[in-house]
Amino acid sequence: MKNYIIIFCLIAISGYPPKGKEKLITRLFNGYSLEGWHMDVPAMDTSDVSSPFIVRDSLLVSLGIPQGHLITDSIYKDYQLELEYRFPKEPGNCGVLVHVSDSRALYDMFPKSIEIQLKHENAGDFWCIQQDIAVNNMEERRGKKSNWGISEGKERRIINLTDGSEKPLGEWNYFKAQCKKDSIRVWINDVLVNEGFGCTATEGQIAIQAEGAEVEFKNIIHTKLKSNR
């Protein structure tokens, strides 16, 4: 009987889930390599250019140029994504993409997805990239309904709910997104900045952009949401 108790205690202390149970929390960036990710950078197809994604001082860094995406190898569904990010030099553009699927689906660059904007002073905007999502006050936040769309030339941006949720340039911002069924909710520094529903995708890969500005990332954590959340 004592042996069984010892074995049970060791399993509990180890933190490992029982065999056959899915691990709920995963660090998507290990701090020293891009293991678990792959790049899609069009300029690297035909020219000898350096990677826009590197690891520096235990941080994942998007150098911004050449433009492209760093994409998880795995597909995710019903999850929470947390990370910290900052612009260490000049303010600029970047984004986190969820429900990523077909590569280069827009402008021969952007994969099919919903982009959650990180652009300085615009963090939390949605951009529809061959996928769509709805929000409250849709016309106020997306423009004239006849212009809505998910492809080139259409009104794909849905403005976020708040101003002033980002920290001063150079400081770390805390980002959290919950993707549950067909809904997406986004917080910046614990402020709810966007909330959408009726998303046309409910699963996919996760991607980080290189879109012109240098951005540093750390503490990238995926948490599987339980069915009752």
Image: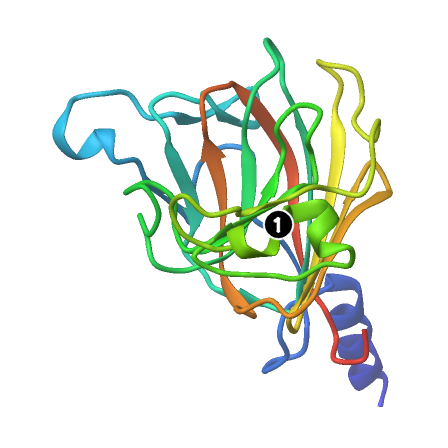
- Give the total of numbered labels: 1
Residue 146 place in picture, x, y as percent: 54, 56
| Rendered location of residue 178, percent (x, y) | 72, 58
Task: Please determine whether, in this image, residue 8 is positioned above or below residue 90.
Answer: below
**Label 1 sits on residue:** 144
Q: Is residue 82 left or right of residue 89?
A: right
Per the image, label 1 sits on a secondary structure element best described as: loop
The residue that appears at 42% across and 40% down in the rendered structure is 70
Is residue 128 found left or right of 18 in the rendered image? Answer: left
Residue found at the very far top of the displayed protein: 89
Q: Which of 170 and 114 is in front in this view?
A: 114
Residue at left offset 51%, top offset 25%:
61
Taking the view exactly as shown, the residue that stands out farthest to the left is 46
User: Looking at the figure, which quarter contains the C terminus?
Assistant: bottom right
Q: Residue at x 79, y 82 (%)?
A: 3
Q: Which amino acid does label 1 sit on?
A: Lys
Left or right of 87? Residue 108 is left
Front one among 159 and 153? 153
Q: Quadrant of residue 197?
A: bottom right
Residue at screen point 43% across, 26% down: 54
